[in-house]
Image (cartoon, rainbow, N blue to C red):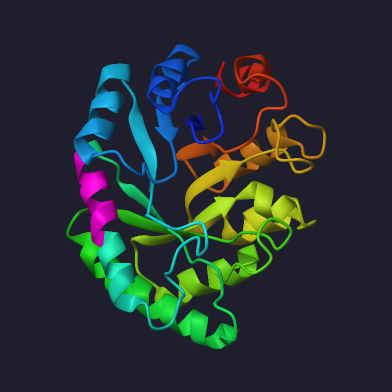
């Protein structure tokens, strides 16, 4: 049976960030994911997880709003490694073993091929550093409707980079929302890329609300995900249409 993790960057925002851990636990989640916790020390984050009795299923590298990551930004390789070391320090403190490497926006005037080359080289170096820490790196595509100038705009592009790097600890962050929202054949996506997945995230395809918004059959999609051998966490990265708890009825169909 699949395991579900609450993205407390989007869920339980009725509470201050520090209180969302307990709220997620009370709602039945055993794990959480969240954006890089800017302004908090690693020990603080670890303490919140421990107090709530939760694990962190996914960590994110630091980023700035104007770049959304720099893994694919030519000329910023040194800064990328600095951010990576910061992310490792948080992952070590919390015990998280999956780290999201954000490709980032394509710098103006930069060829896509140059971004791809930089991303591939950065991932090769990062994979070696991550292996000594027993961390798996995951790479995500973000559709152009959400971020028009993101370096990786399709699941096919992200998967090609992952396969080109060809390291066992560099995997695909398979975000079903970003694929489904732009009309991808989801059965084909799971059949083609399910085995590459190191982490999965979900949301309703129409407005990124609860997965039961009617635009996608997540009962079928999650069943197929299990069939292709994925057994890790599924991150619930959606914006509740109503209150978070009121919108969790869909989850009962998958966990009990």
Measured from the top left, where is residue 71 in percent x and y?
42, 70
Q: Is residue 42 above or below residue 151?
A: above
Q: Is residue 34 above or below residue 136?
A: above
The magenta region covers 85-93
Measured from the top left, where is residue 145 in percent x and y?
74, 58
Q: Is residue 193 above or below residue 53?
A: below
Q: Quadrant of residue 150?
A: bottom right
Foreground residue among 182 and 34: 34
Residue placed furthest toward the top: 26
Residue at the image position 37 percent from the left and 58 percent from the top:
137
Measured from the top left, where is residue 228 in percent x and y?
56, 48
Q: Count the marks.
A: 0
Foreground residue among 158 and 26: 26
Tell me which secondary structure the magenta stretch mostly adopts.
helix
Measured from the top left, where is residue 115 in percent x and y?
50, 81
Quarter placement of the C terminus: top right
Q: Is residue 85 left or right of residue 175?
A: left
Residue at the image position 23 percent from the left and 61 percent from the top:
131
Q: Quadrant of residue 191?
A: bottom right
Q: Is residue 3 magenta?
A: no
Residue at the image position 44 percent from the left and 75 percent from the top:
119
Q: Is residue 90 magenta?
A: yes
Q: Is residue 161 left or right of residue 182?
A: left
Residue at the image position 46 percent from the left and 84 percent from the top:
117
């Amino acid at each position: 049976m699949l395991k579900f993790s609450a993205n407390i960057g989007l869920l339980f925002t009725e509470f201050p960030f520090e209180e969302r851990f307990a709220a997620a636990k009370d709602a039945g989640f055993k794990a959480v994911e969240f954006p890089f916790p800017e302004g908090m020390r690693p020990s603080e984050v670890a303490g919140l997880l421990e107090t709530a009795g939760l694990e962190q299923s996914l960590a994110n590298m630091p980023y700035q709003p104007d770049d959304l990551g720099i893994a694919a930004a030519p000329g910023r390789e040194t800064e990328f490694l600095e951010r990576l070391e910061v992310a490792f320090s948080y992952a070590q403190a919390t015990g998280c073993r999956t780290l999201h490497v954000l490709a980032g926006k394509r710098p103006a005037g930069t060829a896509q091929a140059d971004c791809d080359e930089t991303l591939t080289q950065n991932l090769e170096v990062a994979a070696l550093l991550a292996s000594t820490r027993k961390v798996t790196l995951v790479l995500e595509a973000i559709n152009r409707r959400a971020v028009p100038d993101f370096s990786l705009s399709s699941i096919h592009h992200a998967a090609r980079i992952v396969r080109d790097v060809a390291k066992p600890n560099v995997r695909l962050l398979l975000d079903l929302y970003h694929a489904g929202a732009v009309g991808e054949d989801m059965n084909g996506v799971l059949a083609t890329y399910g085995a590459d997945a190191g982490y999965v995230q979900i949301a309703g395809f129409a407005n990124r609300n609860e997965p039961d918004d009617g635009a996608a059959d997540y009962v079928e999609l999650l069943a197929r995900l299990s069939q292709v051998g994925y057994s890790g966490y599924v991150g619930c990265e959606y914006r509740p249409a109503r209150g978070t708890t009121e919108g969790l009825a869909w989850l009962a169909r998958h966990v009990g």
